[in-house]
Amino acid sequence: MPNAYEVVFVGTRKIENVKSLITNKIVFVPIIHTLEKVNALVFTSAYAIRSLIESASHNPCLLHWKNIPSFVISPASAQILYDEGAVVEFVGKKAHGEAFAREICPLLQERKVLYLRAKEIVSGLDAILKDNHIDFDEVIAYENIPQSLPLKLKPKPKSVIIFSAPSAYHSFVKNFGWESQYVAVAIGQSTLSHFDKHMRAYVSPSPNFTTCIEFAQNLALNLQ
């Protein structure tokens, strides 16, 4: 089918059985917090969890992190915590940064919270915590670094392009611009909100990689 659309996954890692384009590099930042008095951990990214796991392997002060109740944005990220034997108190229902913040604020009253985050964030979760008078500290757990890519990696015009995060979209456009025949698929509402309003764009029915990829593949089959 020479005119068929091709599905391309854009983000920070390769996905098996899908053409992948790595536009951003994740760099873990060593966490030096002592966790003293902290009785709630907040995660909006699997990368923040993995960064904490990495830091805890070198920093004895962090070894008891698994015993501190975690509030995590999505089931996929929660699974990492379960696999580590950590205490998971709350898993977000919508996997969207602002909605997650609204969900957890009533649960974090009277807590000492540690929010483990990216160097740059778009959800505004920190501002919402402040507005709700939550006692919290922030630590930068990782950095999301846009990559400079050669034009030979630019997807063909007839492509359904999955964006795994707002940063992936911005990095892609900076490298390659946007073709009128491209079709964008956002993994969630936060990513969708960053798209140019003139783009042909869709959002995954559920904010997880498997559902998003299946949605994009079915979409590609029906495009002409």
Image (cartoon, rainbow, N blue to C red):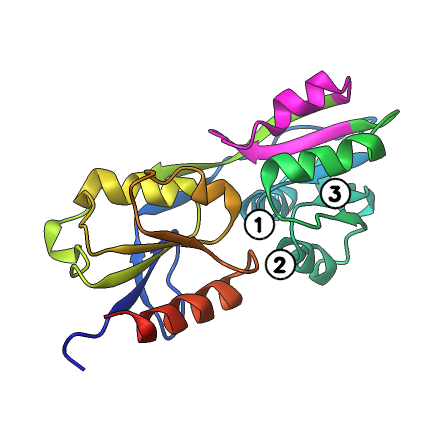
Disc 2 or 3, which lies upstream in sequence?
Answer: 3
Q: CA distance from mark 3 to mark 1?
A: 12 Å
Image vertical order of residue 82 relative to residue 98, above or below: below
Q: Which mark is residue 76?
A: 2
Disc 1 or 2, which lies upstream in sequence?
Answer: 1
Disc 3 or 1, which lies upstream in sequence?
Answer: 1
Residue 81 appearing in the image: yes
Q: Secondary structure at mark 3?
A: strand
Residue 147 appearing in the image: no
The amino acid type of the residue labelled 1 equals: Ala
Q: Write the residue at 34% across / 38% down.
A: 197
Tags 3 and 1 touching, CB below 8 Å: no
Comparing labels 1 and 2, the label whose residue is closer to the camera: 2
Q: Which mark is residue 46?
A: 1
Front-most of residues 111 and 212: 212
Neighbourhood count class around disc 3 (C-alpha, 10 Å): few under 14, some 14–19, many 20 upward? many
The amino acid type of the residue labelled 2 equals: Ala
Find out whether residue 134 is within the magenta segment.
yes
The amino acid type of the residue labelled 3 equals: Phe
Q: CA distance from mark 2 to mark 3?
A: 13 Å
Q: Write the residue at 19% across / 47% down.
A: 149
Magenta region: which residues? 113-135
Neighbourhood count class around disc 1 (C-alpha, 10 Å): few under 14, some 14–19, many 20 upward? some
In this figure, which residue is indicated by the disc labeled 3?
Answer: 71
Q: Secondary structure at mark 1?
A: helix
